[in-house]
Image: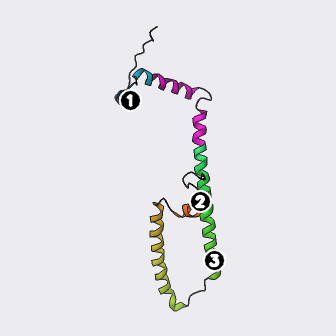
Amino acid sequence: MAKPRANIRLSNKAHALLEDMARAPGVHKSAIMEAALWAYVDERRPGGGDKAAAQRLDRMELRLNAIERDTALMVETLGQFILYWLTRTEPLPEGERDAAHRLGQRRFDYFIEQVAGKLGDDAGLAARVFPGVDVDDGDAH
């Protein structure tokens, strides 16, 4: 029994994509279009897209957990540094303040350069603080 025929019109871009996909051996335009139709219908059916949505939510939750962990690390680190600095640093005599401010500015500039370099580095502080944890998704290895 022959399958029914359907004539459809596609945009040039969609048609070029269909042609490109159908170049693979054993792949036919009809099979591509039928799979796309079923995927569209399944997604529209109540509960049809739930599995894909649940998977995306799970990935988002992993990333949010990693962000939460990293934020807690940063807040605690900053808090400990400020506490130490405020309780251990003596005020400078008036004559030494200008030199100390210049030195502090040079140190701060160097610090910012180091942070900027580490932001693009895969082996940043989070990877050193949490060894064995993939800092991208929060999963332990």
Amino acid, disc 2? Asp
Measured as percent of width and height from the top left, residue 140 is found at: 61, 53
Task: Please tell me in which quadrant of the rendered image residue 90 appears.
Answer: bottom right
Q: Give me the disc on residue 84.
A: 3
Q: Is residue 122 magenta?
A: no
Q: Nearer the viewer, residue 12 or 27?
A: 27
Q: Please give left or right for residue 87 compared with residue 9 in the image.
A: right
Measured as percent of width and height from the top left, residue 62 is found at: 60, 49
Measured as percent of width and height from the top left, residue 51 is found at: 60, 34
Residue at position x 45%, y 78% in the image: 106
Amino acid, disc 1? Met
Considering the numbered disc 1 on the image, is that residue within a helix, a strand or a loop? helix
Verify CB contact (< 8 Å) between mark 3 and mark 2: no
Mark 2 closeness class: few <14, some 14–19, many ≥20 residues within 10 Å: some
Residue at position x 55%, y 61% in the image: 127
Q: Nearer the viewer, residue 125 or 74?
A: 125
* Chief SS of the magenta region: helix
Please, which residue is most extreme toward the top here?
1
Mark 1 closeness class: few <14, some 14–19, many ≥20 residues within 10 Å: some
Pick whichever of labels 2 and 1 is earlier in the sequence.
1
Range covered by the magenta-colored residues: 33-57
Q: Is residue 50 magenta?
A: yes
91 versus 124 height, above or below: below
- The residue where tag 1 is placed is 21
Of marks 2 and 1, the one in the foreground: 1
Of marks 1 and 3, the one in the foreground: 1
Measured as percent of width and height from the top left, residue 22 is found at: 37, 26
- The residue where tag 2 is placed is 70
Pick whichever of labels 1 and 3 is earlier in the sequence.
1
Amino acid, disc 3? Tyr
Mark 3 closeness class: few <14, some 14–19, many ≥20 residues within 10 Å: few
Q: Nearer the viewer, residue 96 or 73?
A: 73
